[in-house]
Image (cartoon, grey):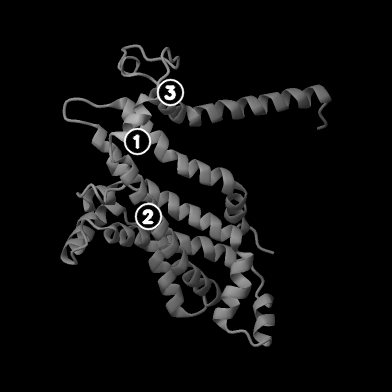
Amino acid sequence: MLMSKKQKFWLQVLTYGVLVILATYCLFPFLWMADTALKPIQEVRTSHPTFMINNLTFGNFSRVLLESKFVTFFGNSMYVASTTTILSLIISIFAGYALSRFSSYRGVKAVSITMLLSQMVPGVLLLIPLYLLMKNYHLLDTYYSMILAYTTFMVPLCTFMLKGYIDSIPYEMEESAEIDGCSRVGILFRIILPVSIPSLIATALFAFVNAWNEFMFGFVFINDEAHRTLTPGITLFKGLYMTDWGSIMAASVLSVLPVVILFVFMQRFLIDGMTAGAVKG
């Protein structure tokens, strides 16, 4: 059925109206967090909170940056998340290529099924075994405990993300390289990886964000403030008898900024990487 220009106009208005409502609903927690971070303590603790800010202040941000160990926590999280991303990406590149190109082998299928089943186990069930393992190897209160735990959980998902993209790459490209005398490793680094940049960036963002936002293992494995990461560190603003909500909101806003900046600049690669392996041919 053909629609008139007036009907198309109102349909477009309705569509954008619904999208604006959904976007506002999704952004509301972040907007409220930023709003609270800019309020003085009297307005934060009022019994009738509103979005209006009567006395704008940056005192919460200065208190977080200058009077706490937020910068240390931030640096620790950046180091752990970056290292986890690099390790997960290196392992997943080889694993994803193997699962894609050698899927007919029985052992490869068994590994694929095992990796898939591992994602069905909640991380909290492995918390005590991993804690005992880290304790026996004297890795508690070190970066290595978090990096090993995060990488263990990231590799299977990153592997399947890269496998889906590699499946969409024509095998004829590799055959041509083999005729020219290129080895398997050469094919991977000279043929597969250059055309897989969108998928690699999407996978790296996925691993980084998950490692950056992880709370449970960082809270349990680390008791030393010198090695504490950002998400458990924010909880230190909550005292036994009083909670500094202004500082918590300011720290939360600052902790979200790196992820937001990454998504703003890498959005195009993220969309391409997520959808590249969805349709073959």
Mark 2 vs mark 3: in front: 2
* Residue 79, position as x, y percentages in the image: 37, 55
Does the CB distance between marks 2 and 3 fall below 8 Å?
no
Quadrant housing residue 51: top left
Q: Is residue 210 left or right of residue 24?
A: left
Q: Which mark is residue 163?
A: none
Amino acid type, label 2: Tyr
Quadrant housing residue 73: top left
Q: CA distance from mark 2 to mark 1?
A: 18 Å
Q: CA distance from mark 1 to mark 3?
A: 18 Å
* Residue 175, position as x, y percentages in the image: 66, 81
Does the CB distance between marks 2 and 1 fall below 8 Å?
no
Mark 2 vs mark 1: in front: 1
Sequence-wise first label, 1 or 3: 3
Q: Secondary structure at mark 2?
A: helix
Name the residue at 46% across, 68% down.
90
Quadrant housing residue 114: bottom left
Does the CB distance between marks 1 and 3 fall below 8 Å?
no
User: Which residue is the site of mark 2?
Assistant: 79
User: Which residue is the site of mark 1?
Assistant: 65
Amino acid type, label 1: Leu
Mark 3: few, some, or many residues within 10 Å (few <14, many ≥20)? many
Sequence-wise first label, 2 or 3: 3
Mark 1 vs mark 3: in front: 1
* Residue 266, position as x, y percentages in the image: 57, 49
Q: Is residue 246 left or right of residue 262?
A: left
Quarter containing the N terminus = top right
Name the residue at 41% across, 28% down.
33
User: Which residue is the site of mark 3?
Assistant: 35
